[in-house]
Amino acid sequence: MINIKRCILPFLSLIIMSLSCTSDSQKVDVDKNIDVIRKYHEIWSNGKVEELDKIIASNFKSHFIGGFEYLGIEGAKNSVLETQKAFPDWKEEIVDIIAQGDKVVTRYHSTGTQLGNWDGIDSTGNKVDNLLITQSDLMYSLPDF
């Protein structure tokens, strides 16, 4: 004779676990967050800073190693433009991107040649080649994208 409790308990557990899985609406949000970060890296590569108005909020804040940070859309625009001025061939290529909820972690490859002043350093003509990892918390009120 089959013990009904032994059969029902795993079955109920399976139902409860499946009901608690991520819904499609959350997946859409994660996909949107990934799209925003992809576009952000695109803008760093192409210098089209007017596109930042479409993807970041006015309360945007970016932190870098060494305490450097920029605030808001204008801060982001200035940072991209300063980088493009010093490294006219600056490119960012996403290698890996992982997202969950409002967090997106990106591993990306950035390259450029320093042909202008950068952070007080005169043009060197040296090529920069970095593999970087960033975490973006998209808990700001983003414009529709």
Image: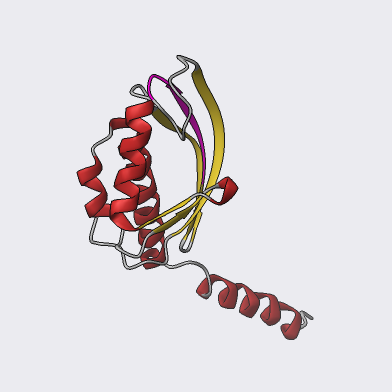
129 within the magenta span:
no
Which residue sits at x=36%, y=43%? 79
Q: Position of residue 106 (x, y in %)?
A: 50, 44
Magenta stretch: give its range. 106-116
Give the position of the N terminus as an image quadrant: bottom right
Q: Can residue 58 be seen in the rendering of this structure? A: yes
Q: Is residue 116 above or below residue 77?
A: above
Numbered marks: total: 0
Q: Is residue 129 left or right of residue 45?
A: right
**Which residue sits furthest top?**
125
The residue nearer to you, when weighing 9 against 59, is 59
Q: Is residue 101 left or right of residue 39?
A: right
The residue nearer to you, when weighing 99 against 39, is 39
Which residue sits at x=35%, y=36%? 82
The residue nearer to you, when weighing 88 against 19, is 88
Which residue sits at x=29%, y=46%? 77
**Which residue sits furthest left?**
50
Instruction: Report the magenta stretch's main SS.
Output: strand
Q: Can residue 42 be seen in the rendering of this structure? A: no
